[in-house]
């Protein structure tokens, strides 16, 4: 990962990008099916944008393979 261009996304941005709600995202995290958040404060987390983007692309790829 190139730290020079790493962008952190807060949960509302991740919800917007994925179309998933908060509870569903946390469920996927707990099942090991979604990128782990990073702690950015005492009560704050964020997600690495590139990891979320990779997860979205792999979900699309799997969906298309299953449809073929």
Image (spheres, rainbow, N blue to C red):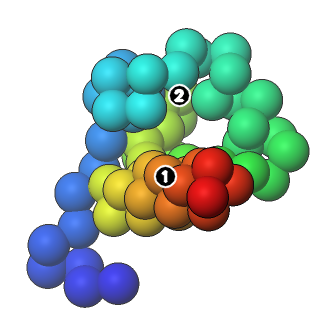
Mark 2 closeness class: few <14, some 14–19, many ≥20 residues within 10 Å: few
Q: Residue at x 48, y 38 (%)?
A: 45
Q: Is residue 47 visible?
A: yes
Q: Residue at x 14, y 72 (%)?
A: 5
As drawn, is 53 to the left or to the right of 2? right
- Helix, strand, or loop for circle 1? helix
Residue 34: x and y in percent read 64, 49
Q: Quick one: quadrant of the C terminus?
A: bottom right
Q: Residue at x 72, y 42 (%)?
A: 29
Mark 1 closeness class: few <14, some 14–19, many ≥20 residues within 10 Å: few
- Helix, strand, or loop for circle 2? loop
Sequence-first disc among 1 and 2: 2
State the residue in front, 4 or 21: 21
| Residue 43 numbered tag | 2
Residue where numbered disc 1 is placed: 60
Image quadrant where residue 22 sits:
top right
Question: Mark 1 or mark 2: which is in front?
Answer: 1
State the residue in front, 39 or 2: 2
Q: What is the count of numbered marks?
A: 2
């Amino acid at each position: 990962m190139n730290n020079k261009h790493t962008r952190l996304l807060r949960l509302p941005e991740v919800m917007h990008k994925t179309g998933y709600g908060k509870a569903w995202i946390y469920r996927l995290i707990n099942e090991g099916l979604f990128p782990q958040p990073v702690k950015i404060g005492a009560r704050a987390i964020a997600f690495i944008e590139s990891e979320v983007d990779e997860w979205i692309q792999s979900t699309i790829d799997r969906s298309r393979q299953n449809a073929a």
